[in-house]
Structure formats: structure tokens, C-alpha cells
Image (tube, rainbow, N blue to C red):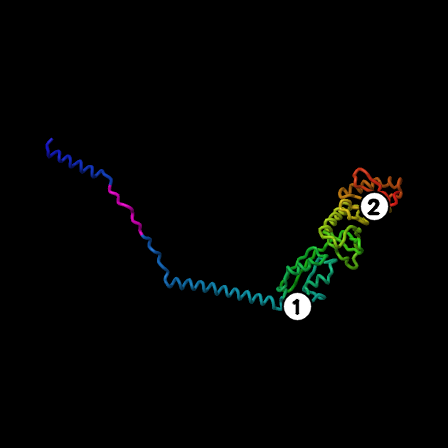
Amino acid sequence: MGRGQAAQFDFAMAEDGGTAAHPPDPGPAKRQRAKPEPRHGWRGRIGRLFVWTAVLLALCAAIFALYRLDEYAASDAHFILRGDVLHHPGLTVTGMLHAPEARVLGVFREDFGRSVYLMEVSERRRALLAIDWVRDAAVSRRWPNRLDVRIVERVPVAFAVFPAGGSKLIDAEGVLLDPPPRAAFDLPVLRGIAPEQPLEIRRARAVQVAALIGELRPYATQISEIDVTDPENLKLTQVVNGNVIRLQLGNENYLARLQNFLTHYPGIVRRLPNARAFDLRLDDRIILEARPDGR
């Protein structure tokens, strides 16, 4: 090979190597700065000011309208409760049978001659619930100028006779009730209750009495007295075949024990005609209670 050919070959190789090599690193890319958002001009500021002004005006108008409406409802003659505690055409009371009428109507004394809108319904209901005969109450407005009052009265279960003297009716929740005038109740006498007892104690004993009366419903008219002095041993005074009998019933199985006694009583009275007190706390036997004189 000649010299000229070798030089030509070397030149070609160098040329090929140059084209095969990687292109030079362009270096880190330059970050382009974000274009700032166009700022709102004076038109945008005026627009926002206009919106907030409109909202403020609407709010002021709403407040003023509510004020005028409140003023109208509180003073307009259309909403005035007519009458008084003696003549009350605008007040309707339902469910009142034994609750003292004067106390019930007295709750609304200051509402007569005023707008029913001004009446505090929750306060009137609380005042009604403070009356002993009222177990529950609901007070509602009937627009434009009437009131509806619905009362749920307590139901007495017995006459509670106190050890220190005096008596009151008592309901199943242990609440003592003043007997209403000219009202007749066919209820047993209850002993073992006193006004100074906490309500929880009276309630627990009244619940026992209500359970006993409910269980002995077929014989309820013959029960004359119930003694709950000992809650573990309720004592019952009952008329059986014309005789006044005193029975100890314990605190359960009242009906079964009484029926067992009534089944065997004819045979007992034939053998022991003067027996008047019995202990029925054992379900399988009847025990004659000794008389105070020991006989």
C-alpha cells in the first residue's frame, strides 16, 4: 500500500469515529420563569367592593325586617291572648280532671292581655309540672292568639296514712297528692309511707304496691289495707267470707300465695273459726300467725 492510501484510510477512520461518538452534554436545562398572572386592575377592586356592599345591605335589610316582624308579633292586637283566669276564651285546657284548676290557670295569669308570641313555652310547662297532680304537660301556641294546654294527670293507687297522722293519695311513682274536693276513690289504705321519706324510698315502695295490686286485680275490691313498712314482707288486710284477714305475702308470688290460701281457707275456718292472721311466705304451706295474747 502506498503512503497516500494510508493517509486517506486514517482520515476516513477518524471521520467515522467522530460521527459514532455521543453528542456533547448540553448541560442542565434552564428553568423558565412562570409568567405572573395578570393583576386585577381597578375594575376588579370596584367589583369586589360592590359585591360586599350588596351583601352588607342585604344583611342589614334582613335584620331590620326581622326586628319589625318581632315588634309586630309582640304588639299587634291580632296576637293578644284574650280573657283572664276566670274567663279565658283564648286558652284551652284538656286532660284536667283532678288537678286544681286555679293553680293550672294561674300559670298563665301574666299572659292574658299580652301577645302569645311573648310567652315562654318551656317556662309555662315547667310551672305546670310543679303541680303535684300533673305528671306531664304540653303547651303550644295556636296562631294568631290562642293557647292549647294538654295535661296528663297522675293516677293514685292508694291512700297513704301517715304514722304521725294525716293522709294523702299516692301514685305509682311515690308522689303524694292532695285529695281533690268532692272526688271519690275506691282505693286501699297504704301504711309504711311518710311525707318526710325521700322520694326514692316512697317510689320504690309505691312500685311494689302497684305490682301487688296489678297481680291481685281479680281480688282488688276485697283488699282494704296494704302495709309496706317492711319492703321484704308486704302485709295485706283483706275481707274473706265476711272476715277481716291479715296476710303476710313476702315480696313475690302474690297471686299464687293468695289463691292457695283462699282454696284452703274454708277448711281452716272450720277447724279454727277465730283465726285471723296467716303467714303465706312459704309457697307450700300456710302458717297460723300467733295472736298477741299467745293463743
Q: Which residue is mark 2?
A: 246
Amino acid on which disc 1 is placed: Gly
**Horizontal side, residue 75 vs residue 158: left or right:** left
Q: Which residue is mark 1?
A: 113
Pick whichever of labels 1 and 2 is earlier in the sequence. 1
- Percent position (x, y) of residue 73? 60, 66
Q: Quadrant of the C terminus?
A: top right
| First to last magenta residue range | 23-32
Give the quadrant of residue 95: bottom right
Residue 92: mark: none
Q: Is residue 31 magenta?
A: yes
Residue sitting at x 64%, y 67%: 114
- Percent position (x, y) of residue 119? 63, 63
Q: Is residue 59 magenta?
A: no
Residue sitting at x 24%, y 42%: 24
Q: Quadrant of the N terminus?
A: top left
- Percent position (x, y) of residue 133? 72, 57
Give the quadrant of residue 180: bottom right
Amino acid on which disc 2 is placed: Arg
- Percent position (x, y) of residue 48? 42, 62
**Total number of numbered labels?**
2
Q: Give how far apart the Cα atoms at labels 1 and 2 are.
A: 59 Å
Magenta-colored segment: predominant secondary structure:
loop
Return the residue nearer the eye: 118 or 233. 233
**Horizontal side, residue 292 vs residue 207: left or right:** right
Q: Secondary structure at mark 1?
A: loop
Q: Is residue 188 above or below residue 5?
A: below
